[in-house]
Amino acid sequence: MSVPILEIVDLHAAYGRIEVLRGVNLSVPKGAVMALLGPNGAGKSTLVKVISGQKKPTSGDIHLGGVHVRTGGPEELARLGLCTIPEGRSVFPNLTVEENLLLMSYAGVPAEAVLETAFAYFPRLKERRKQLAGTMSGGEQQMVAMSRALASDPALLLLDELSMGLAPLIVDELYETVGRITETGVSILCIEQFARTALKISDYAAVMSGGRVVATGEPDEILETMSDVILGGAA
Amino acid sequence: MSSFLAFTIFGLVSGAAYAIAASGLVLTYSTTRVFNIAHGALGMLLSFVFWDFSVRQGMPTLLALFLVLFVVAPAIGWFLQRFVARGLGDAPVSVSLVVTVAILVATLGLAQQVWPPEARSVQPFFAGTSYEMFGFFITAHQIITIVLSLVVAVGLYVLLNRTRIGTAMRASVDNPELLKLFGGQPERVAALSWAIGTSLAALAGVLLVSTVGLDYFALLLLVINAFAAAILGRLQNLPLTFVGAMALGLVTSYASGYLPTDGLLNSVRNVVPALFLFAVIVLMPQAQLRIGQVKGIVSAPLPSPFKALSWSGALLLGVALVAGALSEANLLLVGTAATYAIVMLSLVLLTGYGGHVSLAQITFVGVGALAYIKIDSPNLVGLLLAGLVAAGVGALVALPVIRLTGLYLALATLAFAVIMDRMIFQADFAFGFNGSLSAERLSILGYQVDSTAGYVWVMAVFFVLMGLALLVVRAGPLGRMLVALRDSPAACGTLGLDQRWFRVGLFAASAGMAGIAGALYAGLRGTVGAAEFQFFGSFTLLLLAVVFGVTSVTGAALGGVGLMMLPVLQADYPGIAGLFFVVIAVGAILLARDPNGLANQLFRLGRLLDRRFGNRIRERIPVLPVPGGSLGGMREQARAEHDANAAADQSLTTVGLGGGAATTPGPDQGPAENKEPAGV
């Protein structure tokens, strides 16, 4: 078996005195899609922040593509091929769509290529290239955000709560896009509360609760065993 | 007709220089959300550097210009962003304004320290070269100024709108964290914009210095012109800023050309930029409430009534003892300290509790003094009336800008201070040009306080009374509303609180307190003049208030003493007079993020000592057999307070605010995790 693209070993992190991650162990194989599920307050978003470099862990190790990540800031990790789409609207509201796309070229892909990819996947963005991103609907904003995942050809894609605040129809559309990204061989760690939607596209799934990963396995097993217990039958 | 053309060209030239300064201001504000009040001061400092290079050291002009614009200025800008202004964009306006005011004062102090006052002049570029156009001569320097302003305007527009780094500059204001996830570097972007902004300030300073002259304050005021122009473009829009600068240049030029040279209208020409600024601010559209931005600070704890009363008594006793022993000159100093302490109390109300910044507090003192003299009834009624007049003026300043918040409110007070300083105070009906008026000592209920010692004690009484009143207000429902409005205006709006009229009232109350201080001051000195109420005094006042603690009465008392000592120390050590400004400014920059200031550190020390020794000492004090056991009750109270103190410290540390090393969980998540602007 090849080296996993992301390996997390006994990771701890805290906000002040409140410990949120209490020894997370997780491994995402290269080219696989891993869904990370769990109730509110389980530490999912904190985990994303730690992996993407926005937050320093208190202890533990993170290996990206077999390399031990120590002190990389989020911008360095982004340039090395880690693409993070944080929860909420991850666009710059006071910049136009085109300017948002232009900034994506920081990750290493030329600006023209970014625009081309984005407009190929989402023709609607081309119509609205001069519009301020903040004035678009939530779904359209997520299209802009997804364009970054599509265009920057990352080694690992972190998706945090893609569905937050969106209509189910649009969520399905977005996950179709995620599905297309997986076809290109990108590894994805996908955090989601809509368990069913996420599990449809994933190869593996993990469940977090109370700051630990409490179960991992194939999507079907996870859905069967965990959804009733932890998600209370939601989704 | 030819004179009209001359004024027009002169106006366009100065407008061009304002445009350069203003676009630098817009650049730093729109990319880091820090409004740099020190922008003009930096231009002043750098034009002194230019003088030093080109005249004193005799470098070729081009080399000196290159060094100033592309080496010294960017280095200063980078330094300021990296070590002073970092992270200020998210801080409350009161914090970021205090920090930039501190930069202003530090810059001024530095300039005065390095280049002590003497006659200096800088020649215009290509002096003596001029061209004839339409029968009118225009100098090469003027042409260069206009051309450069166009180059700057176009260059900045292209930078911000057509390049990736410029786009990143604007993006970093929206969401710096997201920019990092994109792979951009918000810190580097912010440093670049400060470097460019400072360079533009330098360019404007160097271009203006041959006409304005190398003067600390004239160039400092350049900033008001730049503010006015920049605010026309709402601090974002570069083309509108350019238009605003040109309009302002023309208006200023025509005003100096066509206004009558006598009467009140004559002094209008000195305040055209301030009037322009005021007008533009008044015409601004309604400010939006910003949702989801709770910007609370942890204030110094409120003392219990027992504690407040005993310390008040101690202060009055101390002043009485000291006043009996001091010479007349020193008594005047103590009285001045009491005046400043009262003014600082007004800042405790406005800034510490209310979260607004006033840059005109000393002006209100002047209004109070003037009203007291003009009313000419030196008794409690006259004093009250003087306070009311100042309060009315304060309300008048806040009223036109009722729709605005934060920064614009503070700028309105600055414009007001300049207008009063240059126009009203110097008018014949007020103090007169370089004039002064005499005032009588206050009489209380028919008894006139003649001796200076007695008068100083009376001032201390006023300070204590106002301080106690402030504490009572803070502890009551009004105080809760004040703090709630400071921390989240949006949440208060949803509860049905109308913050606009509340703010007008707050400004009025604060100005009234400052006005009473002014009236008392006039009575103390006997003669007062306009020179004592210059707007610059409000800057040092604000800084010292923040250094000593703007959230507590103790801080106000200490700050009053500090502000009184400043000119005394500067007179005693004239060689390092400028350095004192720098020291205060550095202190304010260090402490601005914790507006509780030194006073709070004192409180913390007090609590520490109390925990260590308090109970042991209380056990040693024998209980006197007092009828009714009132003393025993007091002891109980003191013990209860001690316990409350211990509990308070604990609860602060549990949320990571106490700063106790023993309770901090790990070394790794220190300040980075404390997202609260209060910091530690």
Image: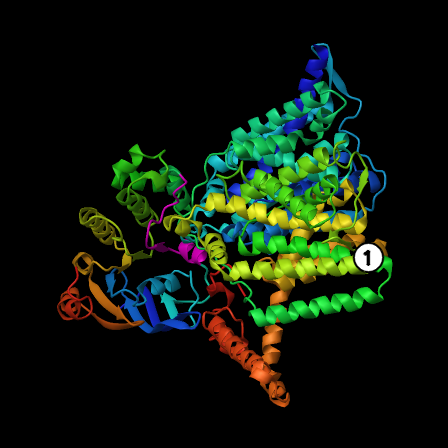
The quarter in which the C terminus of chain B is drawn is bottom right
**Residue B25, image x, y percentages:** 59, 39
Specify the color scheme.
rainbow
Image side of residue B359 versus residue B139, left or right? left
**Subunit ID for the residue under disc 1:** B
Instruction: Look at the image and say whether residue A79 sits in the magenta stretch.
Output: yes
Q: Is residue B33 visible?
A: no
The quarter in which the N terminus of chain B is drawn is top right
How dense is the environment of label 1, judged by Cα within 10 Å: few (below 14), some, or many (20 and up)? many
- The one nearer the camera, B165 or B266, is B266
Image side of residue A37 versus residue A49, left or right? left
Query: In this figure, what is the number of numbered marks?
Result: 1
From which residue to which does the magenta span run?
A74-95
- The one nearer the camera, B15 or A121, is B15
Residue under circle 1? Answer: B452
**Residue B196, image x, y percentages:** 60, 41
